[in-house]
Image (cartoon, grey):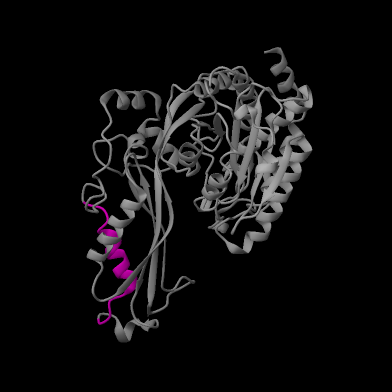
Amino acid sequence: MFLVRGVCKVVGEHDRRALAELAQFIRFPTVSSQPKHAGDIRRCAAWLAEHLVGIGLRNVRVFQTSRHPIVYADWLLAARRPTVLVYGHYDVQPVDPLNEWNSPPFDPVVRGGNIYGRGACDDKGQMFAHVKAMESYLRTRRALPLNVKCLFEGEEEIGSPNLGPFIKRNAHALAADVAVMSDTRMLGPDRPAITYALRGGLSIELEVRGPKIDLHSGNFGGAVHNPLQALCEMIGKLHDGDRRISIPGFWNRVRRWPPEERAYMAKAGPADEKILSDARVRSRWGERGFSLYECTTIRPSLSVSGIVGGYQGPGVKAVIPSRAAAKLNFRLVPDQRPDEIERLVRKHLAGIAPSTTDFAVRTFLKANPALIDRTNPAMNAAESAYERGFGASPVFLRSGGTIPVVNIFKEVLGIPTVLMGFALPDDRIHAPNEKFHLPNFYRGIATCIAFLDEMGKMKNSFAGSKAGQEREVAAVL
């Protein structure tokens, strides 16, 4: 314990430098979904790799993919100790609507104990807590208490299309006992949480096409089916009167959870009032018979995340648009399968599409749900780490979000993932004025230090693992 206190003391002495480096990290506009930022993403990957070299990690490499780079680094000098695979992503969501930001999204500012900027919390700030923890250990002890492999990608926000193939090609070199990432939420500033379940995802775009060109609404209104109206009519048929998704077969695999699991969720999770307060809305909406926490975790959902069609400028324009499109985001639960749900969605849309228009469906993301064993020894290490870093025992939470790599680690590498979140419910992830609470950043670093220490004690906890003996990673990757 004394050694870890010494490491944390170094963190405190370098808070200002760590904050300045985080701000520099945030300044890269790494929006992975927008091709115009491809160069920014490459520059950020190079900066991150240089930073990892500077803190003392080894075998640092930047791997180009068909889209955005993957950054790898390791430290594998702890014989007969476990190996932890530290994952994070440095890409971010688009900043729209830009006019709702109180400060430029890629010019980070500190206000009221928070750092504001796109990616400040999701996931640059949370990921950087692990980097600073490793740096603090290496600066003070000249060694880590276990073996570490780092895998930082630039495509998480677009579904990690290149990460799975990369991990499959390099499964031997990436062998580890457990993965850890910080890309999830806590309940509050002094209420840490470990996530043990994630929903899966399916993201599609539905496009409806009508006339070959925009038409004058005075000349053709009432005679031609407006594609924007047809699109809205189709969207309106995706839910029934009970706010349930009305796609035939959609619910066939939705798991029914036993009363004891729902009772634990009611005890550990946020109340309806808290969720409504965090969302800044007055009244609830959702499937009847379930709490809002259950609606966002153990029940599937469908959100219309974007819609375009017709005139978008100031004032009015008397026009019937030639096309309209909507982006639909499904969140899936165990044991739903994205491929099967995609087929059901396409079949249903074909059945409800009006004969007066044409339609097309494009799929952008598919990810499986994930469940993590709460009794895994690494989860116990995370519990102890939070108690040391935050002075409070964490609760176990389900998340309504989707992190595709969790299943990739399980299926390809055969390892669980510890989800140690440091985000707050009001950090505005994916929204304008995203922020990261700085006390959580610093306490997050201390928690990551404690996690490394706790895991380093577990040399006999992962029977049969040879991950700690990997030494020639650079020759394999």
Can you tell which quarter of the image residue 357 is in? bottom left
> On the picture, is 256 further left or further right than 279?
left
Residue 47 point in image, percent of width and height = 73, 48
- Residue 141 falls inside the magenta stretch: no
Q: Observer-nearest residue: 143 or 77?
A: 77
Q: Which residues are drawn in magenta?
A: 223-240
> On the picture, is 151 further left or further right than 336?
right
Q: Observer-nearest residue: 29 or 74?
A: 74
Query: In the figure, 423 relative to 359: above or below?
Result: above
Regarding residue 406, the answer to whether it shows in the image is: yes
> On the picture, is 466 further left or further right than 293?
right
Give the residue displayed 40% in from the left and 28% down from the top.
269
Give the residue displayed 49% in from the left and 72% down from the top.
313
The number of numbered discs placed on residues in the rendered structure image is 0
Can you tell which quarter of the image residue 324 is in? bottom left
Give the residue displayed 56% in from the left and 51% down from the top.
155
Query: In the figure, 354 relative to 67: above or below?
Result: below
